[in-house]
Every structure is written in structure tokens, then in C-alpha cells.
Image (cartoon, grey):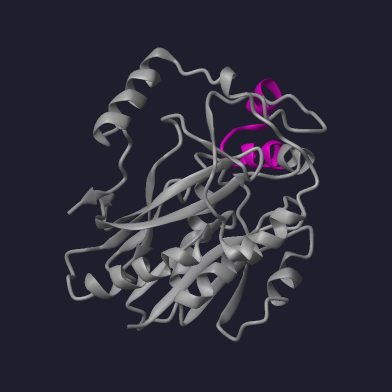
Amino acid sequence: MKVSGFTFVRNAVLYDYPVVESIQSLLPLCDEVVVAVGNSTDDTLGLIRSINSPKIRIIETTWDDTLREGGKVLAVETDKALAAIAPDADWAIYLQADEVLHEQDYPAIREGMERWLAYKQVDGLLLKYRHFYGSYDYLGDAPRWYRREIRIVRPGAGIYSYRDAQGFRKNHDEKLRVKLLDATVHHYGYVKAPAAMQRKQETFGKLWHSDAWMAENVVPATEFDYSQVDSLQRYTGTHPQVMLARIKAQNWQYEHDMSRNRYRRKDQLKHLVEKLTGYRPGEYRNYKLV
């Protein structure tokens, strides 16, 4: 079984992405990892080149900054990386630059890829998610945080990145048929120094919205206000080994008062149903469980 990893990144230094850790978490599972490095204003290319692994293959890309509707440029860059993987790969594992796999989940991921390899009706494999917020000690637990997404796909077969690269589809807008694995992506997109987080928000909003919308809806600031969150829970588990040095180097403080958790009434109901049954009413599913 041959496995390729793929990802894309731009301005990782400026926006403090844990992309090195993300790639390092892919390497033990993959025969190669393709990294599409976009035209950056910092030394992202040098950062990726500094990772000491012969498995890494870099392709340099240029982002089309005119693709500002719905984050489409992110899907375009994902597709560039996917198209560059080895043509004889059996599976392709995708991570975004702020997503990291835990080494404890490697056995489940390997077993899943081996188990479903011969079942061609299975287009991809679904992973669970933990969304960290503010610091490495808190998780977003409101229904707006997605629980699962496709992160392993069968190369070819018309599979492409969907919308803003959150997931995948195939052929003409057809949802992928997937199996759920007992493995979890650690998503650190909302864990940055407040100044870096603010820079990311002000810049990345432009991938979805016009300059006029940004001027009206995004207030310039020196630091991101992490207090604007509905509900969090304290994380009591472990982090991936590759993240430990970054976590130790955290240079800001964030504490959340659990008594300030505030669900909207409909979210309270969703949360209760999910807690009792495991089912989340109204959940967006960009896939078909088979």
C-alpha cells in the first residue's frame, strides 16, 4: 500500500502556522508528502526546506488573489498539491497547515486504509476533530465547530477539493462515500499569539469577502479578542508529540471563565440531543457514510 500526503501553505511564518508540526505528523504514515508552497512575503519556502526528510517534495505555486468568493483559492491550491502526488498512490492523506495528527491515532489510520483499500466503493476516510481555541487548554464545543471531515481520499476517480477546501467531492458535485475512523485531527487554527491571530483574521477574511465588506465588518486592532466565543471546555487529553515544543514556548496567557459559556437556545437543544444520542441535529455533512 502506497500512501501520499499533501498540503498547501503560504506565509506560514507571518501567521504563525504550525505547518512544520503538521507535516511532521504526516511523515510516519506516508511514503511522500507533497507541499504546495505559495508565493509568500516571508520565508515559508525556507521553513519547509528546513524539515529534514527525503519524503518531502515541494512544488512552488502562485495564488490567484482574485478568487475571493467563498475561499475558492484555498481549494485551487489544495487541488494543485493533490494533482502532484505519485500517480500510483493508493491513498492520499490531506492536512491543512494548522492541523496535526496524534501519534496515538497512527494504528487506527493505518488499519483503516488497509481495511478499506480493496473496497473501491469507499472514496475516502472520515476523521474526527478537536478544535482548540485561545490556548492549548481549551476546545470549542458549540455546534458551529464541525465534528468530522474527510482527510483521506482515494487518488483519481474525479476527486477534488470542495468550496474553501474544508472537504472533498467528486465528478460533478457528488458527495464522497466514506468510512469513519477512530482518529482525531487536532486543529490549532485559533491558537496563536493574539497579534498573529488578528493579522490572520484581517488578511484571510479577504479570501471570502470584498474590500468593502471587510472595511465595514472587520475592525482593525493590534490583538485578536479571544473573549468573543460562545462556549468552551477545558481539554484534559494529550497533544501530539510534535507539538510539545511549540506548546512549551507559548508566550501569551488565556483563561476562559466556564461560567460565561453561553449557548443560544437552539444550540442548547442540539448539545443535549448530541450528548444523549451522539446525533447532532442539523449537522452539515459533506459526505455519505457507508
Look at the image and tell me in which quarter the C terminus lies.
bottom left
**Total numbered circles:** 0
| Residue 11 in view, yes or no | no
- The residue closer to the viewer here, 287 or 186, is 186
Q: What residue is rendered at 58% in x and 24% in y?
A: 258
Farthest bottom residue in view = 54
Q: Is residue 286 left or right of residue 188?
A: left
- The residue closer to the viewer here, 26 or 286, is 26
Residue 213 is situated, as x and y percent measured from the top left of the image, at: 63, 26
Residue 57 is situated, as x and y percent measured from the top left of the image, at: 58, 79
Q: What residue is rendered at 71% in x and 36% in y?
A: 202
- The residue closer to the viewer here, 160 or 172, is 160
Q: Is residue 280 left or right of residue 189?
A: left
Q: What residue is rendered at 63% in x and 46% in y?
A: 136
Residue 150 is situated, as x and y percent measured from the top left of the image, at: 36, 55
Residue 89's image quarter?
A: bottom left
In reply to whether residue 272 is colored magenta, the answer given is: no
Farthest top residue in view = 265
Q: Is residue 194 left or right of residue 238?
A: right
Residue 247 is situated, as x and y percent measured from the top left of the image, at: 69, 54
Q: Which residues are magenta?
A: 200-217
